[in-house]
Amino acid sequence: MNTPNSQNYQAYLELLLLAAIWGASFMFMRVGVPEFGPIVFAALRTGIAAIFLIVCLVLFKQTKALRGYWGKIFVVGALNTALPFALFSYATLTLTAGTASVLNATTPMFGAIVAYIWLKDKLSLSATFGLFIGFIGVYLLVSDNLHFGVTVSAPAMQSNALFPTLAAMLAALCYGISANYTKKYLSAIKPLALASGSQISATIMLVPLSLFFLPETIPSSNAIGSALLIGIICTGFAYILFFRLIAQLGPAKAISVTYLIPAFGILWGALFLAETISLMMLIGGSVTLLGVALTTGILQRKK
């Protein structure tokens, strides 16, 4: 017999599992994107996830839930899936899995900014301070590989993190806009149906574009395996698990997975890709997460 305490304990274990899965997505991008290219890899990810979620949609008899919403679903598909997936795929050509996962964690910060500008949500003094701290953390995180001058040598140019960092932050901004758009226009749709529609519409956008960027050689088995795993496990299955956690813990606690993802992104990158964990990376990541926690109200400055 399951008691409420045992159910909560299981839910928190699932929260850790979800963080581990989403943290692994950056590792899979690091493996697959160099061979497939950012656009093709993003198209494969959404296509595989769409097939998986359509099956779930049929099994749970929610195929009619999207009727009348497809126009708005395509907006969400672009902002929440197609653009961010392509941008993060591009970013991971240069950034480590750990760095990309920390930049992904800035999504709530951008969500708060968009909500303040668009939905007129209040932004407390603590949240404003958190935004400032968070962006300082982002700078510290990638400062070792930023080059602003025009006389950068070729090897340094290859490791320049400026544009990949901007791409990752633009992806986080897209997530923030999408979250507020969904809240305003699509809150009545069941999460599984919304996730399925998002992946389907993103696939429709990305597949035709990907035909112009097909790889010249057949990717390796490791790259193909990465595409399959990120599509099925890190996208399709992760959505189902996330919705389950929302039902069990509530949205506020379920979204706390954002703060756990960087730990796993850094861990998997170090274990499987031999990525270096520098002191500045740990400091920058910690400061960024502190800023996110302040912005979202997880930590509040004492009056």
Image (cartoon, rainbow, N blue to C red):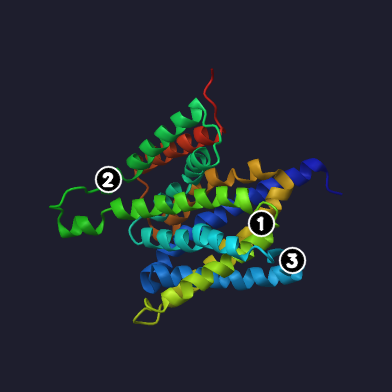
Q: From the image, state whether disc 3 or disc 2 is nearer to you.
A: 3
Marks 1 and 2: in contact by CB < 8 Å? no
Quadrant occupied by the C terminus:
top right
* Image position, residue 148 (x, y; %): 21, 47
Q: Which mark is residue 62?
A: 3
Residue sitting at 17 percent across and 48 percent down?
Answer: 149
Residue sitting at 12 percent across and 52 percent down?
Answer: 151
Residue sitting at 41 percent across and 52 percent down?
Answer: 170
User: Is any atom of residue 101 visible in this view?
Assistant: no
Marks 2 and 3: in contact by CB < 8 Å? no
Residue 42 appears left or right of 201: left
Q: Residue furthest right?
A: 1
The residue that mark 2 highlights is: 144
**Disc 2: CA contacts within 10 A as few (<14), some (14-19) or many (>=20):** some
Secondary element under disc 1, as helix, strand or loop, is helix
Q: Amino acid at mark 1?
A: Leu
Secondary element under disc 3, as helix, strand or loop, is loop
Q: Amino acid at mark 3?
A: Gln
The residue that mark 1 highlights is: 241
Q: Nearer the viewer, residue 23 or 129?
A: 129
Residue 257 appears left or right of 28: right
**Disc 3: CA contacts within 10 A as few (<14), some (14-19) or many (>=20):** some
Q: Quadrant of residue 201?
A: bottom right
